[in-house]
Image: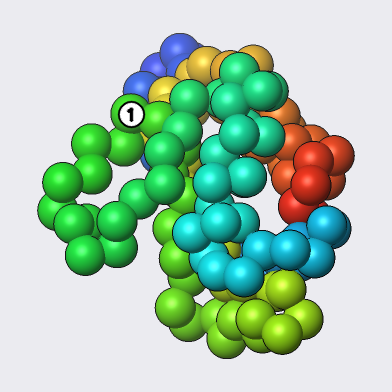
Amino acid sequence: MSQDSSVLNLRFGTEVELLVKSKINDHGSFESLASDISKELTAAKIPNHVADIFAKGDEKYQDWSIVDELSITSKRKEFRFGVELVSPIMEFSDQKFWVGQVDAAWKALEGGEVGP
């Protein structure tokens, strides 16, 4: 059985679950922190939105989603919140694009008013 030497046409997405601490210590809620994460991603030219966890069936996975991660215990008094970043559906063959997207998303988190 011979293998085709062309790149496989695979599609995938990523989910990154984090305990994120507000660097400015004034986010009293997930919504406030998520709004600032969205602004940082937008500034990095990464299309995104804050997702409604109760409307999961409505997701189209066309841009990055910022989700309240309920499996990670938030520590509001310490300004730490469970956050899940969900990527859009990506083409494995377009490695330059998806590596750039993941790298830019991570840098936006590290460099903004929020950080892992």
Q: Is residue 4 above or below residue 78?
A: above
Q: Nearer the viewer, residue 36 or 90?
A: 36
Residue 33 left/right relative to 113:
left
Whole-percent x and y of residue 53?
A: 29, 63
Whole-percent x and y of residue 36?
A: 62, 45
Query: What residue do we see at 44% from left, 78% from top?
Result: 70
Query: What residue do we see at 79% from left, 41% from top?
Result: 112
Q: Is residue 101 above or below residue 79?
A: above
Q: Quadrant of residue 82?
A: bottom right
Q: Nearer the viewer, residue 86 or 76?
A: 76
Q: Is residue 14 above or below residue 18?
A: above
Amino acid on which disc 1 is placed? Gln
Q: Nearer the viewer, residue 74 or 3?
A: 74
- Considering the image in quadrants, where does the N terminus appear? top left
Q: Is residue 33 visible?
A: yes
Query: What residue do we see at 18% from left, 57% from top?
Result: 55
Query: What residue do we see at 80% from left, 65% from top?
Result: 25
Q: Under tag 1, what secondary structure? A: loop
Whole-percent x and y of residue 17?
A: 57, 64
Residue that badge 1 annotates = 62
Residue 34 left/right relative to 9:
right
- Considering the image in quadrants, where does the C terminus appear? bottom right
